[in-house]
C-alpha cells in the first residue's frame, strides 16, 4: 500500500484507534477486581477508624472481621430489614423517598466499649462529602468520627478529612436531655462548653455547613432506632421518668 495516499493514513489511524481502545478495555477489566478490593479495604479502614483502630489496607479485612461484631440495615421505622449494610450505596439511597431508603448500622467493639457506627453522606462546596459517626451505647455520645470528600479545596474544605477537625467530635452528644440536637460545625469556633458544636474551618464555611447538614439529616433518620435501643435498656415499670423520656424522644422523631 502506498504510504503517501490518504487511504493509508485513514486505515492506519483506524487500526491504531481500535488497538488502543482494545488495550485500554482489557486493562480496565483486568484491574477492576483490584480497584474494588482497594475500595472495600479503604471502607473497612474508615469504619475501624471510628473505633480508634488504625490499620493498614492489607490488614483491614482481618481486623474488621474481629472488631465489627455485626451489621444490618433498617427501614425508616427503625426496623431491621433484609439487606447488606456494607454494600448499601448512600448516594443511591438519598435519591429515593425516605420511606424507601435503608439505613446501615455497624456494631463494633474496642476495649469492652460497644459502638454503633452510622454512615453519613452529604454535599460540600464542590461535590459529595461522606463519613462515619460512631455512638456509644447511650445512643448520644460520639465515640469516633471520620469524614472525607471527593473534590474539596486543599487547605479549606478538604480539612474535614484531617484529624484536627474530626477528633473534637469525640465526646460530643447528639441529644440535650431528650431533645435531638445533632452536632453543628460552628463558624468562628464553638464555645468551650458546647456539647453539640465543634470548631468550623476558616475559609471553608460552605463545606463546614455541609457537614452540619449531613449529620442532622442522616442522624434524624435514625431516631426510631435510637428510641428502640433505649427502650431495650430500660425497665419501663421501674422508673416512670424514663418512660417520659422515651415518649419525648419519640415526639422528636422526624419522619
Image (cartoon, rainbow, N blue to C red):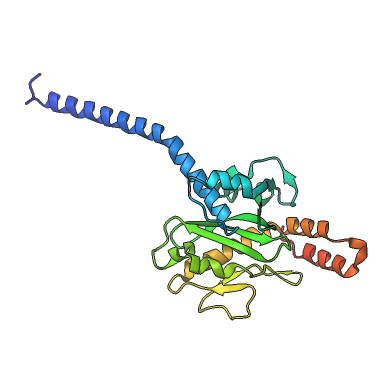
Looking at the picture, how far across and down is residue 46, in whole percent? 54, 53
Q: How many marks?
A: 0
Can see residue 102? no
Relative side of 89 to 224, left or right: left
Residue sitting at 87 percent across and 65 percent down?
243
- For residue 119, what is the image quadrant? bottom right
Q: Residue furthest right?
A: 237
Find residue 61 and report its horizontal and vertical position in percent.
Answer: 55, 44
User: Left of 132 or right of it: where is 250?
Assistant: right
**Residue beneath the point at 65% across and 50% down:** 106
Q: What is the quadrant of the C terminus in the image?
A: bottom right
Query: In front here: 212 or 161?
Result: 161
Depth check, front residue: 138 or 78: 138
Residue most extreme to the front:
111
Residue 164 image position (x, y, % from top left) = 49, 69
Query: Residue at point 53% right, 51% down?
Result: 45
Query: In the image, 95: left or right of 80?
Result: left
Give percent across and percent down for residue 111.
Answer: 66, 58
Q: Nearer the viewer, residue 116 or 247?
A: 116
Quarter residue 137 falls in: bottom right
Quadrant where the N terminus is found in the figure: top left
Task: Work out whether 28 lies above or below 89.
Answer: above
Q: Residue at x 43, y 36 (%)?
A: 32
* Position of residue 221 in the picture relative to residue 250 (left or right): left
Amino acid at each position: 500500500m502506498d504510504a503517501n495516499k490518504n487511504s493509508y493514513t485513514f486505515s492506519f489511524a483506524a487500526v491504531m484507534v481500535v488497538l488502543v481502545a482494545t488495550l485500554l478495555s482489557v486493562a480496565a477489566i483486568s484491574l477492576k477486581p483490584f480497584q474494588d478490593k482497594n475500595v472495600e479495604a479503604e471502607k473497612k479502614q474508615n469504619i475501624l477508624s471510628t473505633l480508634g483502630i488504625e490499620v493498614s489496607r492489607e490488614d483491614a479485612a482481618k481486623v474488621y472481621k474481629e472488631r465489627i461484631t455485626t451489621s444490618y440495615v433498617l427501614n425508616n421505622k427503625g426496623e431491621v430489614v433484609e439487606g447488606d449494610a456494607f454494600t448499601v450505596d448512600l448516594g443511591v439511597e438519598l435519591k429515593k423517598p425516605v420511606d424507601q431508603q435503608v439505613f446501615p448500622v455497624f456494631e463494633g467493639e474496642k476495649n469492652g466499649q460497644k459502638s454503633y457506627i452510622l454512615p453519613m453522606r452529604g454535599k460540600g462546596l464542590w461535590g459529595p462529602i461522606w463519613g462515619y459517626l460512631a455512638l456509644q451505647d447511650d445512643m448520644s455520645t460520639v465515640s469516633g468520627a471520620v469524614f472525607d470528600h471527593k473534590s474539596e479545596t486543599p487547605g479549606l474544605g478538604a480539612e474535614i478529612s484531617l484529624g484536627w477537625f474530626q477528633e473534637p467530635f469525640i465526646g460530643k452528644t447528639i441529644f440535650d436531655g431528650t431533645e435531638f440536637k445533632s452536632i453543628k460545625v460552628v463558624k468562628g469556633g464553638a464555645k468551650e462548653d458546647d456539647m453539640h458544636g465543634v470548631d468550623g474551618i476558616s475559609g471553608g464555611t460552605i463545606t463546614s455547613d455541609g457537614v452540619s447538614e449531613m449529620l442532622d439529616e442522616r442522624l434524624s433518620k435514625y431516631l426510631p432506632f435510637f428510641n428502640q435501643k433505649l427502650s431495650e435498656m430500660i425497665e419501663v415499670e421501674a422508673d416512670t421518668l424514663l418512660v417520659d423520656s422515651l415518649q419525648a424522644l419519640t415526639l422528636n422523631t422526624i419522619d
